[in-house]
Image (cartoon, rainbow, N blue to C red):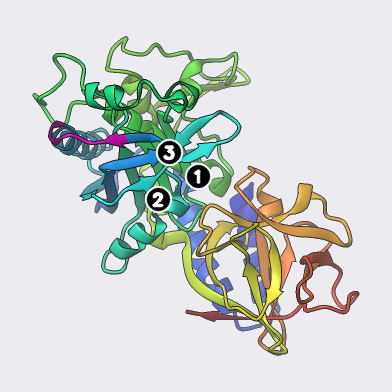
Amino acid sequence: MVVNEMIGSLKNLISRNEEPSYFESAAQKIDRLMKDAADQFLARDHTHLKEPVRYNVLWLGFTHVTYGELDFRMTGFDREYLQAVVLNFEKFLEKITDHDIDVTVDLHFIEDEAPLTLYESEGWLYLAQTTVQPVIDRYLADNDYDTVLTTVQTDGNENRFRNFSKKEYSDHPVILGLCVSDLLSPMGYSTFNLGKPREGTYPLEDPETPSLYATAVAVHEWMHQLEALGTLLGIEYPNTHAYMGPELYPGYLKYTAGKNDYDFFEFYKLVLSGTLPYKDNGVTRFVGMYPKMWPLTKLSTCYIGRFLIQDADGKGYLTGRKAEPTLTLSKDPCIWDIRYSGNGLFILSPRELPDKRIDLSNAWDSEGNTINLWDSTGYAKAQSWKLDKNRNGSYSIMTAYESGRVLTAQRDNPVLLCSKSSFGGVQNWIIKPV
């Protein structure tokens, strides 16, 4: 069990009678929350929280997005409709969780033109997190947000008339929705288009009733962010597409869109209330969000902070380059977001590349293998690192695999994974909070 492994590693620390490092102390606090959540899941205990988790959402409506000659804009009605979608999203989540979370959404309309990005493998266009990060940072400066949602408008007669004759309009449709970052990232981020209301669904009759298609898309993409709880807690947690049924997701029933609720809301309700049936070896249990999992969705819970990582001899900084996502030793400082991923391990992401993380190439724990920056791959051990404190106060950034190899850097050359003291490069790092 993943949680038991975490506790074991902490007991080993105590048995050595050493003072816990800053990162070990942070891990201890988070491990206690994780153990409580895992225990509640295993006990099939749905006891509600004494106080709701206050969950804060930054929602940005980009009123003007472009790609090449394509030009999409929100109308006055689109803005009004998005406000209703936000209210529907907020009230539905609070109701279905029986107020284990208290959701506050701050909606801001962004008037500046923003470029869309081509999602190469699928040919879709979407609003990349790196594109809007400067806007996000402006709002983060004064507020404590747990996730960011962004919405663009690509449907409607005005946009069709403006773009239908342009070749790229048929070649590259704007993506319906995409989850870019989840709980194991510096900040969760999902983006989607607004679409338009179907007849009879707007204006809202009851904000607590999930009745708008755009609300369904928002809930769906946000739920993808929560899937990391399965990895964190070492438990069965449903993929947000598990409504497709046993052919693709063994153990799960198939759900039909709109059978009992609009879109797949019947399925979403079961997941968010921890009552989704899952059959394993003939035994059915209920999976999804249990009350004590909600504290783990807070950005501040697993997020350790921002740091500079400087080599112990003062030769340079560990740097993630933006032009091509590589990892080097550079004279230029680089700010790193560090997030706890369980089992005494941490994920490290460059601040300017929030969708990337330090990654062991091809998950090969071999001498001299290259260390890169890469998107989340699902190979947790290849993208999580032990911050092992040395006697002189520096840290070794050590692989999660058994070899104990560490990040090893030379200026202007790729960072490699090497055994300690087996290579003439930098292996000891001073990790300083920003």
Q: Is residue 21 left or right of residue 354?
A: right
Tell me the quarter of the picture where residue 405 sits.
bottom right
| Sequence-wise first label, 2 or 3 | 3
Residue 267, percent from left and from top: 38, 22
- Which residue is the site of mark 3? 67
Residue that appears at 51% across and 37% down: 118
Tell me if residue 300 can be seen: yes
Q: Is residue 232 left or right of residue 303?
A: right
User: Magenta region: which residues?
Assistant: 72-77
Compared with 284, 240 (above or below) is: below
Compared with 318, 136 (above or below) is: above
Q: Which mark is residue 229?
A: 1
| Sequence-wise first label, 1 or 3 | 3
Residue that appears at 43% across and 30% down: 175
Q: Residues within 10 Å of mark 2 (few under 14, many from 20)?
A: many
Residue 211, percent from left and from top: 21, 22
Q: Nearer the viewer, mark 2 or mark 3?
A: 3
Residue that appears at 52% across and 52% down: 184
Q: Is residue 420 magenta?
A: no
- Which residue is the site of mark 2? 297
Regarding mark 1 in the picture, which secondary structure is present there? helix
Pointers 2 and 1 in contact (C-beta within 8 Å): yes
